[in-house]
Image (cartoon, rainbow, N blue to C red):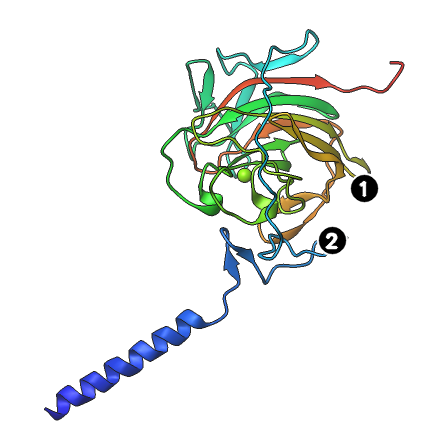
Amino acid sequence: MRLFVWLALAGCLFAQEAQKKKKAPVAGDDRQGYTDTPQIPGQPWKVHDAARPRPRKVAPAATTGNPPADAIVLFDGKDLSHWTARTREGQEVAPQWKVENGYIEIVPRTARLVTKEKFGDVQLHVEWMIPKGQDGAGQGRGNSGIELMGRYEIQVLESYENLTYADGQAASIYGQWPPLVNASRPEGEWNVYDIFFEAPKFEGEKLVKPAFVTVIHNGILMHHRKEILGRAIHRRVATYAPHGPEEPLSLQDHGRPLRYRNIWIRRLKGYDE
Ligand code: MG
């Protein structure tokens, strides 16, 4: 009998401890955002700030169409001849992503897709779709990304109904700026990005001009020549590291299935050239 009382008491204490642990302050997660990340320079928010308001939803405009005559068509629905692939470790490998029905489908965890050609200032058009019936939440739902110069990420994510921190939802400049509004289409529908990008400039190790980006998502302006703070990393402030004036464009393999189609790019030159 005495043993039973002791066991009951111990059980009670254990339950209380577990409850306390549950209530302890948490730094957040990729659905609600974080409270323990560093301040973003020049902004009142922390990286992936839990308190940063989520952009309001706006129903998108009609958008898709044929590439202009002077565009380099990076994917026309047929093959990956303009692409190679690169692992996280930087090793170049043959692309494993599937081409079917006029689109590319990510085969998760096989390596990011990287253009063979390098680019600096560009206009880029990309269409993407998250296949219906995905699981996962936060950053785990339909995550990929348009990596300009292989570094500066415009986020691709399920953001029609999936909650995450504001600076990590679809069309965000990842870890820096949320989109102005949320124009996401649901799973099973094509989203369209039109991106206008100015490459950063370096003199030796020194950054002399940051990158700027304009992003249109489904016909709606998301960023207007916004300064990019550097290459974003999860939970850290973005920083620049010097690189060439032109670098390959890449599509992120974040371990989630996703489709891309109708990808074209134009090199931007100045006036009177
Ligand atoms: Mg991503």
The residue where tag 1 is placed is 207
Q: Is residue 206 above or below residue 252?
A: below
For the residue carrying disc 2, how many other residues have a C-alpha within 10 Å: few (<14), some (14-19), or many (20+)? few
* Residue furthest front as drawn: 59
Q: Residue at x 75, y 31 (%)?
A: 199
* Amino acid of disc 1: Leu
* Label whose residue precedes the other's in the sequence (2 or 1): 2
Q: Quadrant of the C terminus?
A: top right
Q: Left or right? Give the position of 100 relative to 240.
A: left
Q: Given the current orientation, which residue lies at the most extreme top position?
A: 69
Quadrant where the image shows the N terminus: bottom left
Q: Quadrant of ligand 1?
A: top right
Image: 36 above or below 264: below
Residue 137's tag is: none
| The one of 58 and 30 positioned closer to us in this rendering | 58
Whether residue 115 is situated above or below residue 35 in the rendered picture: above
Residue at coordinates 46% horizontally, 36% vertically from top-left? 142
Residue 128 percent across, percent down from the top left? 52, 26
SS for tag 1?
A: strand
Q: Nearer the viewer, residue 106 or 114?
A: 106
**Count of all numbered marks drawn on residues in the image:** 2
Residue on which disc 2 sits = 43
Secondary structure at badge 2 equals loop
Residue at figure coordinates x 63%, y 38% from the top left = 181
Separation of marks 2 and 1 at Cα, in angstroms:
20 Å
Three-letter code for the amino acid on which mark 2 is drawn = Gln
